[in-house]
Amino acid sequence: MKLNEKILYYRKAAKLSQEELAAQVGVSRQAVSKWELGDATPEVDKLLALARAFGVSTDELLSGDEPAGAEERPSPEEPPVYTAPTPPAEDTFDKATGLIGRLIRQYGWLAGVRIALSGLGVTIVGALARWGFGAIFDTSSQMMGGMGGFGAMGGVEFSPGTPPEVQRQILEELGLAPAASPLGGIESFALGLATVILVIGIVTTIAGAALAAYLYQKGNRRP
């Protein structure tokens, strides 16, 4: 039996771990492991310390004879190898969605601001359309004689300052109301469309402002 095998055998027989034997001999655990693997040979003073730890003589430790009762030779212990834990696989999709979620929580209120600004633009367009259509049809009515500015209609004379509504009411009472203007239907449709656009713009502006305020408070709320 070789020296490294005897060191391993006697250590097992003494029920000592490599750390415990190393402490008694005054070496590191790695040194004991190398002795048992045959990668190194203990010095003379360490042989004496090993013999004392095992309770045998140095001659018995160095002899090539097998110890009495040594039927099975224990296999030398390999030094433990540290294995770094495998990091969890990073899910790119989860990372991307998490980033998007954080951006939405922090800056989602800007979407509400954008909606509000869009609604404000629609409101301005609706207001300008309503004003423009009204001006156009008023001018057309005046040109066709349906508004103020004429001296007489149906034998009834009006002063230039008489409002068109008053003129029309007087003529209706006298049964002399002028024929309906051919532009009446177009005027109603155009003004109605402009009014719808105006209402949509106002509602969108209010909704966008409310959404921006809500998302801003939610995004700045501490978890």
Image (spheres, grey):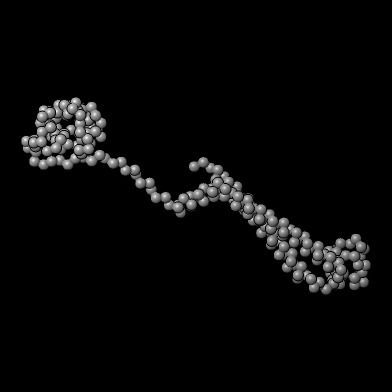
Q: Is residue 69 visible?
A: yes
Q: Could you tell me residue 148's position as x and y percent? A: 88, 65
Q: Nearer the viewer, residue 221 or 20?
A: 20
Q: Could you tell me residue 98's position as x and y percent? A: 48, 50
Q: Residue at x 12, y 32 (%)?
A: 62
Residue furthest to the left: 68
Q: Is residue 214 visible?
A: no
Say which quarter of the image contains residue 20. top left
Q: Could you tell me residue 199's position as x and y percent? A: 68, 58
- Residue 98 horizontal side relative to residue 30, left or right: right
Position of 179 relative to 212 (above/below): below
Q: Could you tell me residue 92's position as x and y percent? A: 45, 52
- Residue 99 horizontal side relative to residue 178, left or right: left
Q: Residue at x 69, y 58 (%)?
A: 122
Q: Residue at x 92, y 71 (%)?
A: 155
Q: Nearer the viewer, residue 155 or 84?
A: 84
Q: Nearer the viewer, residue 160 or 136?
A: 136
Q: Residue at x 66, y 59 (%)?
A: 200
- Residue 23 horizontal side relative to residue 105, left or right: left
Position of 24 relative to 99 (above/below): above
Q: Nearer the viewer, residue 214 or 71?
A: 71
Instruction: Report the quarter where the N terminus lies.
Output: top left
**So how many labels did they put on this image?**
0
Position of 66 relative to 194 (above/below): above
